[in-house]
Image: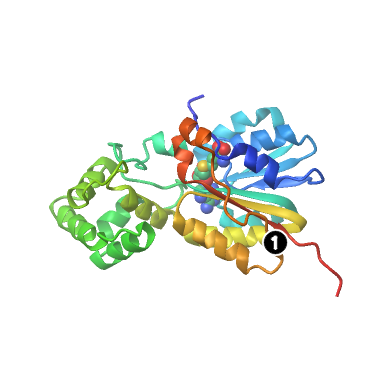
Amino acid sequence: MGYAHIPVLLDEVVQGLIRPAYRLVVDATVGGGGHTYSILTAHPNLRAYAIDVDEAAIVAARERLEPFRDRVKLKRANFSALKEILGDDGVVTVDAVLFDLGVSTFQLEGERGFSFKDTHTLDMRMDQRQEQTALRVVNSYTFEALKKVIAEYGEEWKAAQIARAIVAERKKAPVKSAREFAEIVTRVVRRTGKTHPATKTFQAIRMEVNQELKNLEIGLQAAIDLLAPGGRVGVISFHSLEDRMVKRILKATPELAVLTKKPIRPSRVEITRNPRSRSAKLRIAEKIRKVDA
Ligand code: SAH
């Protein structure tokens, strides 16, 4: 109901991440529950932890996963606390962990300031309990800090001009809505091609608000540590900063064998059906069984 998030690379996840002998899987980003639903349908012996930091996602996932209520534990938490979340239940190893990063359709289409046209408050929090919001970042960061965030997380070469425009505008009146913010950026960045000129800046502010790279680094490391020998971790990322981090961490971990030499990409058919999938990349790695010395 209302939640129209189409899971990305669904077959690839169900087939590539789960092996028949697995018993416990963690969906670290359950969202609307699409991936977990299919995983549990395909593998009747599996149980799952389904985690999301967004209260609205937990509500949606609870409804979607109702048929599996005996096999799923839903937890509202940040996946950077993966070890603590599972540790609270005495769980110290798992067979598979999935991260499906990025923003859900539900978040994008909600009234939370994630999208350019949204006339509601520029909020962008995935976790409504945290204090930091996009509004605070945009209205309180110094010129230098804004420039750095937009340049680093947005890989936007006009970061200085955008930061300058933000500082000039907020002197007149604080920035309020996502739409207003998109307009400030659009005055500085010319449209090229199909992408909205504020795409990179929105991504950057969102990553700052939700500390996305830091959480990914901690969460992915925790997932790797928790994997049982022969277990697998899969990460779907949606932009190059994330993908580079995932690639680097998987490669740098001696106990992992990377199963995806090149990341798995959606087919043309999937991209046509679900344009949001076009930038998705799935990487999967397996924990090597310990060999006695
Ligand atoms: N696979 C899901 C969609 C996931 S969308 C499905 O099939 O429906 C990404 C989700 O990750 C969002 O709901 C977002 O709230 C969540 N998320 C992002 N960062 C998170 C974090 N650090 N901890 C927990 N959840 C996070």
Residue occupied by mark 1: 257
Give the mark count.
1
As drawn, is 254 to the left or to the right of 269? right
Q: Amino acid at mark 1?
A: Ala
Q: Nearer the viewer, residue 37 or 91?
A: 37
**Quarter of the image that includes the C terminus:** bottom right
Q: Quadrant of residue 179?
A: top left
Q: Does residue 53 appear anywhere in the picture?
A: no
Front in this rendered view, residue 2 or 204:
204
Residue lying at the far right in this picture: please name it.
292
Q: Is ligand 1 closer than 8 angstroms to the Cβ of mark 1?
A: no
Q: Quadrant of residue 253?
A: bottom right
Q: Which residue extends farthest top?
A: 1
Residue at x-position 16% and y-position 50%: 173
Residue at left offset 41%, top offset 38%: 108
Q: Residues within 10 Å of mark 1 (few under 14, many from 20)?
A: some
Residue 247 drawn at (x, y percent): 56, 61
* x 49%, y 62%: residue: 214
- Residue for point 25% across, 55% down: 139
**Relative to 77, 287 lies left or right:** right
Q: Is residue 171 left or right of residue 146?
A: left
Q: Secondary structure at mark 1?
A: strand
Q: Residue 230, percent across and down?
A: 77, 56
Q: Return the residue found at the far left.
A: 172
Q: For this rendering, which residue is in front, 81 or 266? A: 266
Q: Nearer the viewer, residue 40 or 276?
A: 276
Q: At which x and y percent is residue 21?
A: 82, 46
The answer to which image quadrant residue 218 occupies is bottom right
Specify whether residue 120 is in view: yes
Residue 228, percent from left and from top: 77, 57
Q: Is residue 188 above or below residue 39?
A: below
Colour setting: rainbow
